[in-house]
Amino acid sequence: MRQALPDFISKEAYKTYYKQMWLVRFFDEKVDEFFAKGLIHGTTHLAVGQEASAVGACAVLEEKDKITSTHRGHGHCIAKGAEVDRMMAELFGRTTGYCKGKGGSMHIADLDKGNLGANGIVGGGFAIATGAALTSQMKQEGYVVLCFFGDGATNEGSFHEALNLASVWKLPVVFICENNQYGMSGSVKDMMNVEHVATRAESYGIPGKVTDGNDIFSVMTDVKEAVDLAREGGGPSLIECKTYRWKGHSKSDAKKYRTREEEKEWRNRDPIKAMKEALVEHGVATEEELDKVRQEAKQEVEGAVDFATESPEPGLDTLLEDVYADA
Amino acid sequence: MREITYLEAVREAISQEMRANEDVFMLGEDIGVYGGAFGVSRGMIEEFGPERIRNTPISEAAISGTAVGAALTGMRPILELQFSDFITIAMDNLVNQAAKIRYMYGGKGSVPLVVRTPSGSGTGAAAQHSQSLEAWMAHVPGLKVVQPSSAADAKGLLKAAIDDPNPVIFYEHKLLYKTSEHVPEEPYSIPLGKADVKREGKDVTIVATAIMVHRALEAAEKLAADGIEVEVIDPRTLVPLDTETIIDSVKKTGRVVIAHEAVKRGGFGGEIAATIAESDAFDFLDAPIRRLGAEAVPIPYNPTLEKATVPSVESIVEAVKHTLPASFKKGRELHA
Ligand SMILES: Cc1ncc(C[n+]2csc(CCOP(=O)(O)OP(=O)(O)O)c2C)c(N)n1
């Protein structure tokens, strides 16, 4: 028998998270397909294979908690409660999108749900998350901020500066590294001289922990501990989720920097399949029930495509709107 | 005659310089086996090895500063910043260090550094990957700023930039990478500070940079059909700026339109306009100087909006017509 499932998540909720896992997968696979067909333009970064870290981390948050996301942000967005309809519409550049068609894939934000935004700048989210945590502390709002980022981003100065500041001010922020082994073509082995990103936490006097990023239960357990600590005033933590991106970095990636064997190895550790097996084994749901959930997710993403396609394009009269907030 | 693309021309210039001088090397994110975000360094690691085609961590502050330090001590680094927007992270090292060192040290030392970086909109990559920030760099004494609009110019200007003992910011327009033309195979240099007259004409001068050179040339074609002869000048380098070629042209035509992709407000077009207005060409002006630049908005993602943000062939045609006398609009000869 596997390890017991975390008991702070209810049986019903597990099904919700299982569905979110599939929403992330189906959404990004759909985006991949549409991008290839030229129906989505610009650039996109897909999180296929990395579903467990996004969904698992956000699963332990309360509604009022906030996140910052990255260029590879569709999964975080969905996990924090965004509707795939409006996300797809954004990627189609339509007015019904989260950014009225002006932001695109790399800039989706959903402030109402506590998603402070994806980011086209690697490392752009560290200090923003820290600042949002400062607000929580100063206004005693009691929320925690989850800051998502990749392994590559931890080589940016902003990572080190933000962790230091968050640490000395004991801010309620949890730094979640999704270590998918590469920053574009740069392997972690060549780009940093410590094996684990989590080790870097030590320099800032905060807890650092490595977790299995392809095991949603492991992510939930470790992030919950860090979130609880932050909420109690114990300051920031750094959690490193070891995972893998199945696809290339973005559209034009020949993936010459890694091997087929390596890709296959990780595909065999499919986080969605692992979750399903565990849920069935622990009697949380039957295989049939879970297949139904999967089907629902699939239909939701299909529906999102219809919604996006039918939505209007922004008019030229909107070009100058929203540069400044009204005084 | 062999034609190669702008992208290949850039690669050829770097490769030839690296073969000629051991001190020249490249550093940047994903420039190794990946070949660079846009493919400029594709194949180069095979020829030059990872020592000289240095794949760096994602750390623009560190790599720009490292390049400054290496340049100050005898190397000739070429730094590739994946998108020119990320220059913001390298800004301290470029603005407060690279640009200032020689002057602060009383003429001692130099920083022979080239920062190559793709800029401009048109790829749908939205607000954080589409900016044209060249005016920032042009504002800083101590930096040189280059903006080639064609493959042959790119090759010659890059050689000059690498040979130059100063820090040079070399903007490559993403949409120009695939454009091609005849480019001589042997190494050659185009001096920084020499504008190019891309088309001769006597009625109106258009001063255009980067992608706008192409739109200006297209506009000139259209206007030629109406009997208007446009002269198109590409400064090629903003710093140093070839004011003489611009002023001479304005004295000849008496009318001038300036077109760049960067936001019009605070853009380099203002500098060019003021330079003309302050010169003896002022007395030759038959119409107010007109500037074209992007709307003061972040580049939007939606393709229609994105296009509408920056000057188009049509808007250039329109601007040129605005400089013409009313009599012309009624169909009479311009110089009647
Ligand atoms: C400041 C900055 N530098 C470079 C880039 C180009 N870029 C976009 S994503 C990326 C790789 C990021 O790697 P990592 O942080 O590990 O995240 P992952 O893509 O693996 O999710 C790079 C180099 C950027 N967007 N911003």
Image: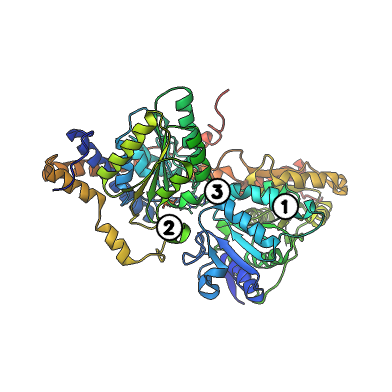
- The chain that hosts pointer 2 is A
Side of B317 where B240 appears, left or right: right
Disc number for residue B99: 1
Find the distance from the CA under tag 2 to the CA under tag 1: 33 Å
Pointer 3: what residue?
B130
Residue sitting at x 22%, y 34%: A9
Give neighbour class at mark 2: few <14, some 14-19, many 20+ (Cα, 10 Å): many
Dot 2 corresponds to which residue?
Answer: A188
Q: CA distance from mark 2 to mark 3?
A: 28 Å
Q: Mark 3 near ligand 1 (CB under 8 Å)?
A: no
Disc 3 residue type? Ser
Above or below, comparing residue B154 to residue B269 in the picture: below
Provide the chain ID for the residue under circle 1. B
Q: Nearer the viewer, residue A222 or B272?
A: A222
Q: Nearer the viewer, residue A69 or A3?
A: A3
Instruction: Kindly indicate whether the residue at mark 1 contacts the one at mark 3 (C-beta within 8 angstroms).
Output: no
